[in-house]
């Protein structure tokens, strides 16, 4: 099977690159904008024809949540229009990564995939448009994830580690609740979908995926400091005391029952995954 990875230089793309060594029966094509501009339909068509692509794992995204508020055309181009170009390859399996930001964050119980979408930011709106584009192809699996981090790139865990070494105290919001997702775990879930497709057991549709458990950003930060052995004191603050251009969801807990049943997944708890990620960072 020939598999195209877009956004290969991001957190998820790098985790896929690392994990690909365990899947030698597949041929992976790792691309970022320098290798394949997915906003160019002619470039996509040429790449697919040249390399006989059978599966696409779309990790490419405009993820600068605050910057998107003043740059909606670019966010829409990458998060939605480019997805439509990929989805036009109707004979290809499309695995598209989306976000909890498609929900409004006002729920009081974990979001199921059927809960009405109501994004409250430009980023969320453009990602929802991308989902609708992905659904135009019959063989698409959309994975909504939350609070993604890894040993690669810039993310909350690595920021906390840096600040924890630089400061004695740190303020982190406690009234935004969700679940961290270790990108390496999400990659394994994605590859389960790829293997199911190879066995003709592909289940299309929208799926939620995060690690198990629930915490606030404050709780997450405290756990990072504790596991890393840092003495920085984390103090809880309200979102209103940390204003940002884009509004964040206050509640992002995802119900993962659908993907666990469809693909027989066992999902690790976020604290266990954090231990594994910190070990990778320290290597």
Image: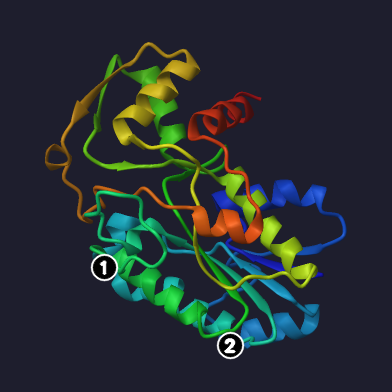
User: Could you tell me which residue is drawn at 24 percent across and 48 percent down?
Assistant: 250
Asked if residue 29 shows in the view, the reply is: no
Which residue carries the number 1 mark?
A: 118
Q: Is residue 217 above or below residue 124?
A: above
Asked if residue 132 shows in the view, the reply is: yes
Residue 251: x, y in percent? Answer: 28, 48
Q: Nearer the viewer, residue 223 or 255?
A: 255
Query: How many labels were placed on the picture?
Result: 2
User: Could you tell me which residue is drawn at 45 percent across and 74 percent down?
Assistant: 131
Mark 2 crowdedness (10 Å alpha carbons): few <14, some 14-19, many ≥20: some
SS class, disc 2? loop
Which one is closest to the eye, mark 2 or mark 1? 1
Check the image and name the residue furthest to the left: 240
Which residue carries the number 2 mark?
A: 88
The answer to whether 55 appears left or right of 241 in the picture is right
- Quadrant in which residue 45 is drawn: bottom right
First in sequence: mark 2 vs mark 1: 2
Q: Nearer the viewer, residue 257 or 133?
A: 257
Q: Nearer the viewer, residue 75 or 249?
A: 249
Q: Is residue 212 above or below residue 94?
A: above
């Amino acid at each position: 099977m020939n598999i195209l990875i877009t956004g290969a230089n991001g957190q998820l793309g790098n985790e896929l690159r690392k994990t690909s060594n365990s899947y030698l029966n597949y041929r992976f094509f790792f691309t970022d904008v320098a290798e394949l501009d997915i906003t160019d339909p002619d470039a996509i068509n040429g790449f697919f024809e040249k390399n006989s692509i059978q599966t696409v794992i779309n990790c490419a995204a405009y993820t600068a949540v605050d910057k998107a508020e003043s740059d909606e055309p670019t966010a829409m181009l990458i998060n939605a229009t480019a997805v439509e170009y990929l989805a036009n390859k109707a004979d290809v399996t499309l695995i598209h990564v989306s976000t909890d930001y498609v929900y409004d964050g006002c729920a009081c119980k974990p979001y199921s995939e059927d809960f009405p979408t109501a994004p409250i930011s430009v980023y969320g709106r453009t990602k929802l448009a991308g989902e609708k584009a992905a659904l135009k192809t019959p063989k698409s699996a959309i994975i909504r994830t939350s609070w993604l981090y890894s040993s690669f790139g810039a993310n909350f865990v690595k920021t906390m580690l840096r600040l924890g070494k630089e400061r004695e105290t740190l303020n982190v919001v406690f009234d935004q609740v969700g679940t961290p997702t270790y990108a390496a775990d999400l990659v394994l879930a994605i590859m389960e979908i790829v293997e199911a497709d190879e066995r003709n057991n592909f289940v299309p549709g929208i799926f939620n995926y995060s690690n198990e458990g629930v915490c606030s950003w404050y709780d997450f930060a405290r756990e990072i400091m504790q596991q890393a052995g840092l003495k920085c004191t984390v103090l809880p603050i309200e979102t209103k005391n940390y204003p940002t251009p884009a509004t964040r969801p206050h509640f992002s807990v995802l119900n993962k029952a659908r993907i666990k049943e469809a693909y027989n997944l066992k999902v690790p708890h976020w604290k266990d995954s954090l231990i594994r990620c910190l070990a990778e960072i320290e290597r």
